[in-house]
Image: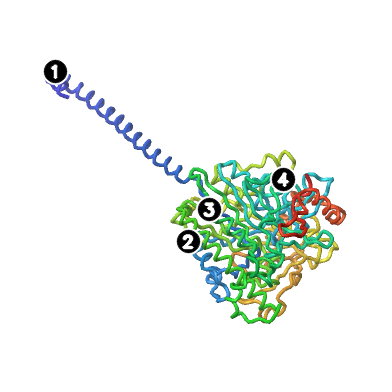
Amino acid sequence: LKLFSSVLGSLTLPMKLYFGKAFFLCFILIATAAGEAGLSLVQKDASVVQSKFQQGRAKKPHIVFILVDDLGWANVGYLREKNGVPSDEVQTPAIDRLAENGVKLGHMYVHYMCAPTRASIQSGRAPIHVNVLNSPLNTYNPADPIGGFNGIPRPMTGMAEVLRRGGYSTHFAGKWDAGVATPDHTPAGRGYDTSLHYFSHANDYWTMEDETKCGDVHVRDLWEFNRNTPFPGRPAEHLLNSPLCSSETQNVNDCQFEDKIFADHVLEKIKNHKNASRPFFIFWSPHAPHTPLQVPDWKLKEFNFIKHSGDTEEGWRQNYSAMVSWLDQQIEKVVWTLKKRDLYKDTLIIFTSDNGGPLASGANNYPLRGGKYSNFEGGVRVASFISGGFVPYSRRGSWEEGLMAGWDWYATLAGLAGVDPTDTKAEEAGLPPIDSYDLWPLLSGEGKESPRKYLAMGGLTVGERTDLTVKKQGGTLVAGIIMPPYKLILRNQKESGCDIFPGPLMPNSSASNPCDGIVVTADCGRTYDTGCLFNVWEDETEHHNLAPHNPEKFKELLDMIDKEQETVYSPTRGGDKGVIMAANWCNMTTLLEAPQLWSNGGLHRFMGPFVP
């Protein structure tokens, strides 16, 4: 500037004006360039900050997935409080605290019974594209090496396999119920590094016996897989109780409650987690409160205030309530251990039921209509939430009412793991693709609407079969559809499923029959005058049938059902009646590791893979 001033002073007035203007323009250009450079630096710094924030968000959380078996909508405290019907019979303080410090999911839907929901969660598919049957575990069709089995078709990729590709250690504990026929059907075959589980729909909590028999011998159902076992694992015979142990004789010979064994396994995995750079995925699938209604005596006595005499409805309610309370205490231990290990702050906890509560076994879904085995809200809309330190602060304590499906967890967790959820292995086998949506943007508050716009509900083409076989046999049927706020149901009197309206306590005056699991009073047809259409976002109790009053919407949803029906997966899973001969299955099982010689004598057969 000094040099320019001295030069300018030696010039004539016209020349001063000329060069003055030139200098001024140069100064403006330089200043603008400097400003742009400075702004560019600011933007770059902001980009770095944003990148670091995204990296922080992209940190992979530890995941504890709790899939409860047969939990009723009204059997957790936070939902009873929401509906204004608190009860001393429902004691779930740990579950309630997690829910209140997380995101409560108001419209999480699953299948109306166990095995299809479990297959859908593990495979990321709607039940109509993987399995809609609670078929016997020994179901086997040798003519179909892909889908001729109980559970998930053989080539489908499991959730744990996807997460393992994302760097997770993967562990399973509890009820599997997603297939057993081949090594590929086991938790080990679906991507779990370790497992301690039973395969079947249910077994005895003390003897670990399944209802299945080989001759006169009950099959034991308890299996383990870890670094000390061959693939895909072996019978966990060392964890069997003494033959003297039973629900009636719990306090002899150090009897272990089966669900305690699973809960301890979960605690062990958390306590022994050493690798700070590798997140864990623990899928904990407790047996409780599924039948048989068994619980430690000390816990049952805490609910003696529920009056009962023998095997009555009140007796079922006492046992069921005690089982849920016992489970709540185990969840509290898991949360406490996560915090003690300083892992809770980086953990995502997912809590959900596999179907609505069975009204025949002491559960209650008030105010929702119906229960397990029904596509009414009480059978398919379940208690669910996310919690843990990984949940954003801004979302804690909130409700999310967007439409969600249990099989959406597959893509959601794949997204958190940074892995493409596409199942190329299944695609190569000609199987249906995944139906899963990544819910995390919605759950975390980044998104405002659920990516899921509709949901097809599964059912069975029951034909002339009786109610006793309908859960185990039949073809795949699209039995309803939900497209917010509407829900259309198709069903007939041959289907099993309870559709009564429960009260705050069950049984009550409006339900003198507590529902034995095959009570049906509604026939939902394909015409306006016989159809069942509800606005379940405003009428969650499904009292007001809109089919006669909104024929346009009824037809729209019915057309969607027919279109979805064209996509169903419906293999012949085995035999002319759906199962192979029991004697043949027992022989095939024996060729593996059963029978096993128990340590103090006695021959036992174990549930396990029976096809190479």
Do the CB atoms of the residues marked 4 and 1 lie less than 8 Å apart?
no
Identify the secondary structure beneath mark 4. Answer: helix
Residue lying furthest front in this view?
Answer: 600
> Residue 144: horizontal and vertical position, in percent?
81, 45
Q: Residue, x 51% and y 51% (percent of image)? A: 447
Counting from the top left corner in percent of width and height, residue 304 is at: 60, 79
Question: Which numbered disc, 1 or 2, marks the residue that appears first in the sequence?
Answer: 1
First in sequence: mark 4 vs mark 1: 1
Q: Amino acid at mark 2?
A: Asn
* Residue under the image location 75 percent in, 68 percent down: 529
- Measure the C-alpha gap from mark 3 to mark 1: 84 Å
Q: Disc 3 or 1, which lies upstream in sequence?
A: 1
What's the distance in space between the residues labelled 2 and 3, CA to CA?
A: 21 Å
Question: In this figure, which residue is indicated by the disc labeled 4?
Answer: 184
Question: CB of mark 1 within 8 Å of CB of mark 2?
Answer: no
Kindly identify the amino acid type of the residue bearing the numbered disc 1.
Leu
